[in-house]
Amino acid sequence: DQQVKQNSPSLSVQEGRISILNCDYTNSMFDYFLWYKKYPAEGPTFLISISSIKDKNEDGRFTVFLNKSAKHLSLHIVPSQPGDSAVYFCAASGITGGGNKLTFGTGTQLKVEL
Amino acid sequence: SQTIHQWPATLVQPVGSPLSLECTVEGTSNPNLYWYRQAAGRGLQLLFYSVGIGQISSEVPQNLSASRPQDRQFILSSKKLLLSDSGFYLCAWSGDGYQPQHFGDGTRLSIL
């Protein structure tokens, strides 16, 4: 049962344009959402997060939008740069007494072309 | 600042051999610690997490075990490796509450 889904395995965008990565979740108990960026043979790097009390969070070129009614979140990267080419994972958490366990999507490979 | 170290970076082991992967965190105390596995073309699957010394929770039944002998040390072990244990193993730490997890650089484990 895939509780966090990234339905686009890959995305190609031109440098300078907007990249939009999408993520859907099914568990209504999730209340904290994160995006990670991963290069080959490295661990994921935290990018940005959002709690369920917000619908938007912005950090520089990165903005995350949360639509709770649709159980959907998206990551916008503007403007896209070649160094943004990586795999992007969304993750979700429902805080329990057992630590902040994350459920990850399967990732979207972003390629930013010159 | 906090750092997380994971070693070795790559490991090739024969089927049936034992395994020990180590992860240490610096610059923080009483972190939550996690072991994940990423199989080829898949997302990250949580294997174990720990909220304190000696406290281990297992998320999926498997051939692996975890231990936390010290506050900032997390070890992933197996007595006898299977071919299906191949993958990319990642250690992570976080604070309590709504805090992101921070990952090490991972160990690429190949079973022959």
Image (cartoon, grey):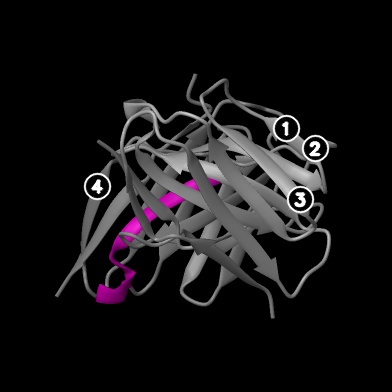
Please say if B27 is above or below A48: below
Task: Please provide percent x and percent y for residue B4.
Answer: 60, 67
Residue on which disc 4 sits: A10
Q: Nearer the viewer, residue B78 or B23?
A: B78
Please say if B103 is above or below A103: below
Distance, label 4 to label 3, CA atoms, is 41 Å
The crowd level at tag 2 (other Cα within 10 Å; few <14, some 14-19, many 20+) is: few
Do callouts 2 and 3 mark residues in contact (Cβ within 8 Å)? no
Distance, label 1 to label 3, CA atoms, is 14 Å
Between marks 4 and 3 in the image, the one whose residue lies nearer the viewer:
3
Residue type at mark 2: give it.
Gly
Residue on which disc 3 sits: B69
Between marks 1 and 3 in the image, the one whose residue lies nearer the viewer:
3
Q: Chain of mark 1?
A: B
Q: Same chain for the residues at labels 4 and 3, yes or no?
A: no
What numbered label is drawn on residue B57? Answer: 1
Task: Please provide percent x and percent y for residue B66.
Answer: 64, 39
Q: Chain of mark 4?
A: A
- Residue interval drawn in magenta: A80-91
Q: Same chain for the residues at labels 1 and 3, yes or no?
A: yes
Residue at (45, 56) in percent of width and height? B106
Distance, label 4 to label 2, CA atoms, is 34 Å
Do callouts 4 and 3 mark residues in contact (Cβ within 8 Å)? no
Q: Secondary structure at mark 3?
A: strand
Please say if A100 is above or below B16: below
Residue on which disc 2 sits: A98
Q: Residue A102 is drawn in which quadrant? A: top right
Task: Please provide percent x and percent y for residue A43.
Answer: 45, 59
Task: Please provide percent x and percent y for residue A82.
Answer: 25, 74
Distance, label 4 to label 1, CA atoms, is 34 Å
Q: Is residue A82 magenta?
A: yes
Q: Same chain for the residues at labels 2 and 1, yes or no?
A: no
